[in-house]
Amino acid sequence: MRIAILSRGPQLYSTRRLVEAAKARKHEVDIVDVLKLAISLEEGYPDIHLRGKPLKDYDAAIPRIGASATFFGTAAVRQLEQMDVFCANTAQGILSSRDKLRCLQILSRHDIGIPATEFVRRRQDVLPAIERVGGAPVIIKLLEGTQGVGVILADKIEIAAAIVETLQSTKQNVLIQKFVAESKGRDVRAFVVGDQVVAAMRRRAQGQEFRSNVHRGGKTEAVQLSEQYAETAVRAAQIVGLRIAGVDMLEGANGPQIMEINSSPGLEGIETATGIDVAGAIMDYVQEQVRFPDLDLRQRLTVSKGSGAAEIPIGARSELVGLTIASCGLRQKDIVILTLHRDGKAITNPRADRVLQEGDRLLCFGKLAVMRDFVPEHKLPRVRKLKRTRVPASSGSDAR
């Protein structure tokens, strides 16, 4: 199998380990600098060149796209996708995770813990935003920051407001985020490959530093994640669209809080802390995907006119609640249940005696017109929940 590792740093630990893992499995592997690629577009024939010559025919590519090369790097990944090269992470997934605001926006629609976050532009909106996330102390983040750079802890509302206004005056995009006090100085990184967490570590800040990043001197230790934390990490990566990801979580009082999702997580810290061959796990996953590629059911299950794949949500008023798969009547109407989604888990080919519950989602194949009868009408716009906010502190006092 031919594999391209898209990296600008052949000397970096992560790149070297991936090369070692590929060679150990007898694969042909090249390190390709994405900024030296040229994208060629013409009718019916997407192509890509390296140093003026057509790029080799690769079976798979593993993107290691740094923040400084995001735009062109994701364009190159997208081009490889058009050429039917399996990419361990898609261009869309990389873009969605790289933008902290966009990532949290995507996650916010799902039942996944995230710290309360605000994004504002007007000066007069800053203080109300700080109050909505719980007041000081508060975390201020630059959208473009990496490795802990551009993350500030402000102890007082007045200081937080001044920092935000100063950063905004320099045309910086800033997030205001709730400070999860019970997680001060530590977080958990789960390394997701495919549909499982292959390794996890806890990072602890040292001294007066509140940031736990290894690049800021944070200490690491291996950790065995609970099922709740492991499932949250995998779901978060999948929702954003990543197959390989480092999912950073705060250990909140109410469970895991997603802090950030990294599409090019470093291997040195996690392998050193856990002793697990993470590079090997990545290579095994890529190898398996190339041999047995995932099918996009919604695009490919269209063998006859009017047939296709659709998702049937089961709400509280659904006539299917309480019935077994055998007795619900779908099979009699030539509708095949491919996957049952329940509590964040995907159950393929569910048993006929399984009882359907409120909140289940069924990925089915059959006549679209028939399945439409089981899909509820589009609901009216939701009524926004009223949030209880604290009374702003006076300008002469410290807010806690």
Image: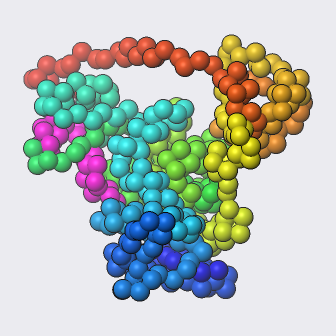
Asked if one can make out residue 202 in the rendered structure from this viewpoint, the answer is no
- Which residue is at the front of the view, 316 or 141? 316
Residue at image point 38% right, 14% down: 386
The tally of labels here is 0
Residue at image point 83% right, 28% down: 333
Task: Please determine whether, in this image, residue 43 is positioned above or below residue 223.
Answer: below
Residue 187 horizontal/vertical position (percent): 46, 50
Res. 273 image quadrant: bottom right
Residue 362 horizontal/vertical position (percent): 72, 33
Residue at image point 62% right, 41% down: 228
Residue 400 horizontal/vertical position (percent): 26, 27
Lateral position of residue 315 relative to residue 390, left or right:
right
Res. 206 image quadrant: bottom left
Lateral position of residue 197 relative to residue 141, left or right:
right
Residue 151: in magenta span: yes
Residue 93 horizontal/vertical position (percent): 47, 53
Task: Please determine whether, in this image, residue 211 is positioned above or below residue 63.
Answer: above
Lateral position of residue 306 relative to residue 328, left or right:
left
Residue 191: in magenta span: no
- Which residue is at the front of the view, 283 or 225? 283
Read off the magenta span: 141-168
Res. 160 image quadrant: top left
Task: Please determine whether, in this image, residue 346 is positioned above or below residue 40.
Answer: above
The quarter of the image holding the N terminus is: bottom right
Coloration mode: rainbow
Lateral position of residue 324 relative to residue 76, left or right:
right
Asked if one can make out residue 305 in the rendered structure from this viewpoint, the answer is yes
- Which residue is at the front of the view, 291 or 194? 291
Residue at image point 23% right, 40% down: 154
